[in-house]
Amino acid sequence: MAVTKETLDEIALSRAEYDLILERLDREPNPVELGMFGALWSEHCGYKHSRPLLRRFNQNPAGQRPSRVLSQTGAENAGAVDIGDGLAVVFKVESHNHPSAVEPLQGAATGVGGIVRDILAMGARPIALLNSLRFGPLDDPQNKYLFHGVVDGISWYGNCIGVPDVAGEICFDESYSQNPLVNAMCVGLVRTDTIATSAASEVDNVMLLVGAGTGRDGIHGASGLASRTFEEEVELRPTVQVGNPFLEKVLIEACLEALDTGLVNAIQDLGAAGLTSAAIESAASGGRGIRLDISQVHQREEGMSPYEVMLSESQERMLLVVAPENVPAIKAVMEKWDVTCREIGVILAEQTAQVAVGSELVVDLPIGPLSEAPQYSLEGKPSEEDIRRRQLNLDLVPLPQDGPQETLIRLLASPNIANKEGVYRQYDHQVQTNTVVGPGSDAAVLRIKGTDKAIAVTIDGNGRLCQLDPYQGGQIVVAEVCRNLSCSGALPLAITDCLNFGSPERPDVYNQLEQAIQGIADACRVLEVPVVSGNVSLYNESRGQAIFPTPVVGGLGLLEVATNATRSAFAGEGLMVVLLGADPSLVDVDDLAGSEYLQRIHGRVEGRPKIDIDLEKRVQALCREGIGQGLITSAHDCSEGGLAVALAECSIQGGIGFNGDFAIDDRWDAVLFGERQSRIVVSLPGDLMTAFVPLASSFGVPVSILGYTGGDRFQLKEQVDVPVSQITEVWNKGLEVASG
Amino acid sequence: MKSRCRHRFPFTGVTGSIAAKLTLECTPPDGNGPILMATPRVCVLRAPGTNCDVETAHAFTSCGAVADRVHLFRVLEDPTRLDGYQVLCVPGGFSYGDDIGAGVIFSSQLRGQLSETIGRFLAADKLALGICNGFQVLLKAGVLPGGSDGWPPAWTTDPENHSPDATLTWNDNGRYTARWVRLKVMATENVFLKGLDELDLPIAHAEGRLVPRTPQILSDWFANGQVGLCYRERPADGQETTLPCTMPAAADPLLPDPHNPNGSIANIAGLGDPSGRVLGLMPHPERFLHATQHPRWTRLGLRGDGEGLAVFRNAVEYFG
């Protein structure tokens, strides 16, 4: 019987891939089997287009620092990093873009739920959430609806499960209209000797399915939603999963208690492609097989077919693999928490995947051919438009009529720069009581109970720069994440990444993907931060237009002494304000490339961004050393909006004026709003400069005095003179005004 | 060593068998050899969906109590389990997901299956504290505002003729809100608030607006010294000056958001019972045990204990 094109489209397999299945099996798969192939060979689960490129990460680590990575990247649900004292931090970022575009509240909520279960599957208690959100401009009602829905979903789910939401970023650009990016990151803490594995390696172990009942929600989530473009997605609403945070909270407690017994041999979350992916990945990574009896699966809808049970993406479910004699003990824990627990399968010696309904076998497949998705390496090529945008002569950009002060005020009101407090006030950022620096600073800082230490976490992306130059952009994103960590005083240890791109089948998008990955890999090598986990979200397109290539990077840093944590806000009056990394008078107009200023004021996304990654490394090292020696009292990186916006933010957040005294030449726009990389604004008592200047030169970092803190006005030479209260008001209201 | 043991626990209302269950612990004093003293036992009662049990238990233990995180299901199986404790604390979170209203299901279990146990607990010289979701639970169960004298609440035994005195409902801004607030302590005769005057604490809730059924009820709370804490104006970030904190009164105008973050009547953030042994409050004292938990600790150079610790220390010292 020949399979129809409609069937293949539904599970997002090509005719050639179907032929490969025939070749591998030497027979036709039945419909359930074909559905399982479709799910496991989807981009979301199988990384068909991205895996060959992802191998570029962590090659030839050149660093002198000993590796702290405890997990093999890609082998487990999240990356684990040793922070000493017998403790490890586990973290990962994941996208939920497509579901959020279709149904924002549930899409975002289940995005949070899914990443939390990835962390739980490492045996770790989730201790922090972060999120990176991107939407189209808020003057479009659809974008506004998506924005509010996503924020509500994160607030609803995250608050209820008792995990603090400590940091994030929100950007707006036309490129994300109708195709929002919703990337959620979770951080967990676990003892190094109790890190769990997903690999089921012991024959005859029992597979337990715990948590929510299995329904019809989310079928084809992986193959349908996440692996194609947005043309028909409004029709796909029923494929979005529905979350129950209360059940997730109970599941977290029950699973952690079950793991505490020491009787759980493997644990795996059910995410994309549901039971199919979870059970088969668990068995495959243990080098074993699996026989499932899906008549034992707790179902919340009547009459579900084997196909539906195997491909449902119902939320709040986990798999536990347990020796037969220990099943009663684990069941008792689940019963204590009122969590449903069913024996649904056994681990086989032979590497086959068998699915039965009672005694009737409905699937019988060899695991290798099923779990090894084909991989494609394509030819990437930048489009002509890409090339043209980079070649713009920025000398031709006219100076705005408005003048520096009005331009600064317009930029502070930009939703990309304005205060995001209206959003993060809706997130509980203090529960678990470890938050030492919460949302609003460059990185959040969480103390590690029982030690003097703290970890710093942050998340960042910059689609505009990656659009202009994906290689430089990829490097810049990693640099900025590490810079944010360093500004809090933390040593960057590792990163996780979420690669949000358009269709890889387009040469220009494939080129972006390839270049951005290379940029990330190269920056990671220099900055000595391995990529320990990640996720790929492709096919982010709507109305035939790909989004800006947007790698989002989450970073983890370590502070040996929690009370060394530093914020971005000016911390007192009469402090000297110093720029690390550059002399502000030596800017050139090329620094306007891809800037918020160029887009907001001139409506242009043009130019060629660049970064000197070796300088970047030295600037960050100097900043950490200055904080560690107790010289630096505040540190803030220069990013969107450039130097003037960075200074204004320090002033606004600290409630302290600033008297700037640095040269501003004719191209004041480049000096004040250019986004040259590798720059950090710090403040320190003037009498410590005699110690700080030699320190800076020993690191080979240029530093320039910018002015002093104090008073209640924000002043930049003769160019800007405005009360701090006025720019505070503008900055505070910017997002509120835009989001209505 | 046992012979040197000194019971300093007031046993009023505690039966012999329960007293026997008291944990006696060695507390090493300042180099003068061990003195044994009664250590109050705290039941941090957690339901499915409770989130703040770990930090709340930690708050009590760091003040010298023995705090157990006890699952509600264990108490439902054996209600006498609660008798062995001197402090009952219902911590924050989303009990039962707050699916049909904050604290509704948990509270119905307290006044339903556990009515007698709770009555016994309140009648004894014991303490009860509800934080955030715990306040919602204590109020909706009827433990507050009446305490022991009001138990079981008339509206549960005679629903035809009685209604609850008050409820906690949605914030005026319609949203879950997490921020720091400035508080003025009014009922210093409440055990938990002894010696406190003004303090900063964080709030994190969606349903924190206290609404009494009648103006008379509000006046009674003030007259009986039941108004525990009120929201006060908080200086903007960066402003060093502390605004004057006036003593609350029933006729106080509502402070605007963000000072009064939920629109609670008379800016009330916490409410006690007439005996002063029960307190419910929306702010989270367990989130400010260390100076570094304050949002401006780096700026203000804060070190050492946080202002919330006193609430738990007061409870422990009551039995000291």
Image (cartoon, coloured by chain):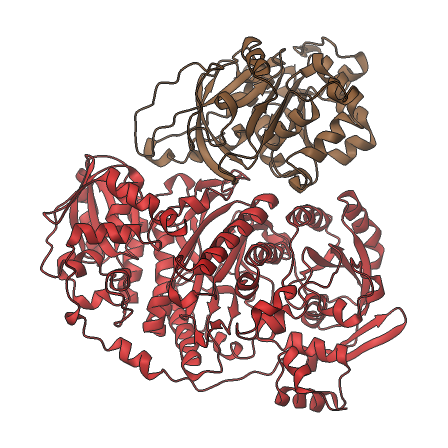
Which residue does the image show at 27% across and 68% down from the upper left?
A: A604
Q: Can residue A88 be seen in this view?
A: no
Q: Quadrant of the C terminus of chain B?
A: top right
Which residue does the image show at 23% across and 78% down from the upper left?
A: A391
**Residue A601 appears left or right of A489:** left
Q: Is residue A705 above or below residue A225?
A: above
Q: Which percent across, then down, holds residue A585?
A: 13, 58
Which residue does the image show at 53% across and 30% down from the upper left?
A: B284
Q: How many labels does the image show?
A: 0
Say which of A353 and B154 sits in front. Answer: B154
Q: Which percent across, then down, holds residue A524?
A: 40, 66
Q: In which quarter of the image is the N terminus of chain B?
A: top right
Chain A as rendered: colour: red
Q: Which of the 4 quarters of the picture holds residue B142?
A: top right
Which residue does the image show at 47% across and 63% down from the upper left?
A: A180
Kindly indicate which chain is depicted in brown in the rendered structure: B
Q: Which percent across, then down, holds residue B255?
A: 42, 26
Say which of A379 and A486 sits in front. Answer: A379
- Residue found at the far right of this picture: A359
Q: Can residue A214 be seen in this view?
A: yes
Q: Is residue A437 above or below residue B290?
A: below
Q: Which of the 4 quarters of the picture holds residue A337?
A: top right
**Residue B116 appears left or right of A103:** right
Say which of A7 and B147 sits in front. Answer: A7
Q: Which percent across, then down, holds residue A212?
A: 73, 54
Q: Is residue A536 above or below residue A707?
A: below
Q: Which of the 4 quarters of the picture holds residue B12?
A: top right
